[in-house]
Image (spheres, helix red, strand yellow):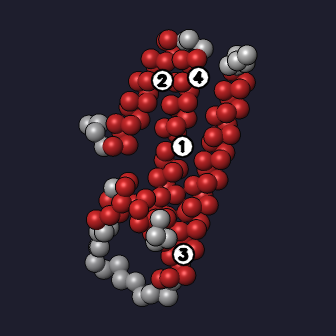
Amino acid sequence: MHEPVTDKKIADLIGNLLRAGVLIAAAVVVLGGSVYLLRSGSADLSYRIFHEAPAPMRHVGGIVSTALSFDGPALIQLGLLLLIAIPVVRVLLSMIAFGLEKDTQYVVITLIVLIFLVLSLTGRTS
């Protein structure tokens, strides 16, 4: 038989998600920083001229594919993207949990929050 979904189970799931997500994101950032320092730590830097990010580092797919080649800055950006994704996944899990509880009002409210969150992250709000 299927066990009922309880508020405690949902809270535990979301708490574990937040904890694991932050630890994973931090580990990826630390790995990226270490790789960057090992490969480029002694390079002379000039802050007089602004250099924009390379083309692959301007979108999620490029960041992920570049990070898979153990590029330090890409790993750092991937860790930050993971950190940004945690609240989105939390809201999504909350919406699913409210749906399992058949709480339509909170599903709608959480869906609105999710829409605004995604729109703000994609820069589509004015």
Q: Give 88 or 1, whichever is nearer the viewer.
A: 1
Under circle 2, the secondary element is: helix
The residue indicated by pointer 3 is 35
Q: Give 16 or 1, whichever is nearer the viewer.
A: 1
Callout 3 crowding tier (Cα within 10 Å): few <14, some 14–19, many ≥20: some
- Residue at image position (47%, 58%) is 78
Q: Mark 1 and 2 residues: CB-CB less than 8 Å, in contact? A: no
Disc on res. 110: 2
Q: Give 85 or 99, whichever is nearer the viewer.
A: 99
How far apart are the two marked residues, 1 and 2, measured between alpha carbons?
15 Å
Please state the horizontal and vertical placement of residue 39, each as a whole percent of the image: 50, 82
Q: Mark 2 and 3 residues: CB-CB less than 8 Å, in contact? A: no
How far apart are the two marked residues, 2 and 3, measured between alpha carbons?
39 Å
The amino acid on which the numbered mark 2 sits, given as a three-letter code, is: Thr
Left of 68 or right of it: where is 19?
A: right
Name above or below for residue 25 compared with residue 74: above
Specify which label sits upstream in the sequence, 1 or 3: 3
Report how many numbered discs are placed on residues in the image: 4
Specify which label sits upstream in the sequence, 2 or 3: 3
Disc on res. 97: 4
How far apart are the two marked residues, 1 and 3, measured between alpha carbons?
24 Å
The amino acid on which the numbered mark 3 sits, given as a three-letter code, is: Val
Callout 1 crowding tier (Cα within 10 Å): few <14, some 14–19, many ≥20: some
Please state the horizontal and vertical placement of residue 86, each as a whole percent of the image: 54, 43
- Residue at image position (46%, 70%) is 69
Disc on res. 86: 1
Specify which label sits upstream in the sequence, 1 or 2: 1
The amino acid on which the numbered mark 1 sits, given as a three-letter code, is: Ile
| Image quarter hosting the C terminus | top left
How far apart are the two marked residues, 4 and 2, measured between alpha carbons?
10 Å
**Mark 4 or 1, closer to the camera:** 4
Name above or below for residue 20 compared with residue 114: below
